[in-house]
Amino acid sequence: MIKIAVITGDFDAGAEIKYLSADGGGAVNSFLGQVRGEGDLEALELEHYPAMTEGALRKIADKAAAKWDLRGITIIHRVGRLKVGEQIVLAATCSDHRQAAIESCAYIMDQLKTVAPFWKKEIWRDGSESWIEARQSDRDAAERWDC
């Protein structure tokens, strides 16, 4: 089972993990990301092109499912204006074994940071805005899976 969702509203991470683990896999691993509060950051605004984004997330999930023996994958990513502390992403995997669940979840997050077509803008308390550029450390993390 693969669940992909790109949404504007909030989500219940606990309910999503419970649903993912319902078929009895022995290991569930998840990553829940929030908007970081750095300095005077007020919010993060995420834009995307729906057809392109959902297709990219599906490819990431399909590659994880092909690489590891998984019972399920959930990827939920929010778009729109998100305030500091709000949930932004959930990546969760379920497998019979912990290593597959842990590695596949890490893989998904590394790919989301580099492959998924989201455009992120920081909005500061003084009213200024700045687009976030990709970081080399994120690209390096994603490339480690190509070996």
Image (cartoon, rainbow, N blue to C red):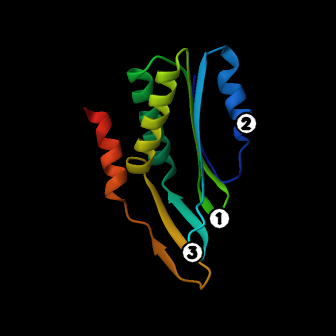
SS under mark 2? helix
Which residue carries the number 2 mark?
14
Mark 2–mark 3 Cα distance, whole angstroms, equals 29 Å
Which residue carries the number 1 mark?
84
Can the viewer see residue 100?
Answer: yes
Q: Quadrant of residue 145?
A: top left
In this view, the residue in front, 130 or 142, is: 142
Mark 3–mark 1 Cα distance, whole angstroms, equals 11 Å
Q: Are marks 3 and 1 in contact (CB under 8 Å)?
A: no
Callout in the foreground (2, 3) = 3
Residue at the left extreme, as displayed: 147
Give the position of the C terminus as an image quadrant: top left
Residue 113, disc:
none
| Mark with earlier residue (2, 3) | 2
Which residue carries the number 3 mark?
39
37 shown above or below 142? below
Left or right: where does residue 88 sit relative to residue 112?
A: right
* Picture residue at 44% right of the left edge, 29% below the top: 103
67 shown above or below 147? above
Name the spot of residue 112 as percent of width and height, x first.
Answer: 45, 45
Name the spot of residue 43 as percent of width and height, x first.
Answer: 61, 69
Q: Amino acid at mark 1?
A: Val
Q: Quadrant of residue 110?
A: top left
* Picture residue at 38% right of the left edge, 49% below the top: 114
Can the viewer see residue 4?
Answer: no
Q: Residues within 10 Å of mark 2 (few under 14, many from 20)?
A: few
SS under mark 3? loop
52 shown above or below 125? above
Q: Amino acid at mark 2?
A: Gly
Q: Quadrant of residue 66?
A: top left
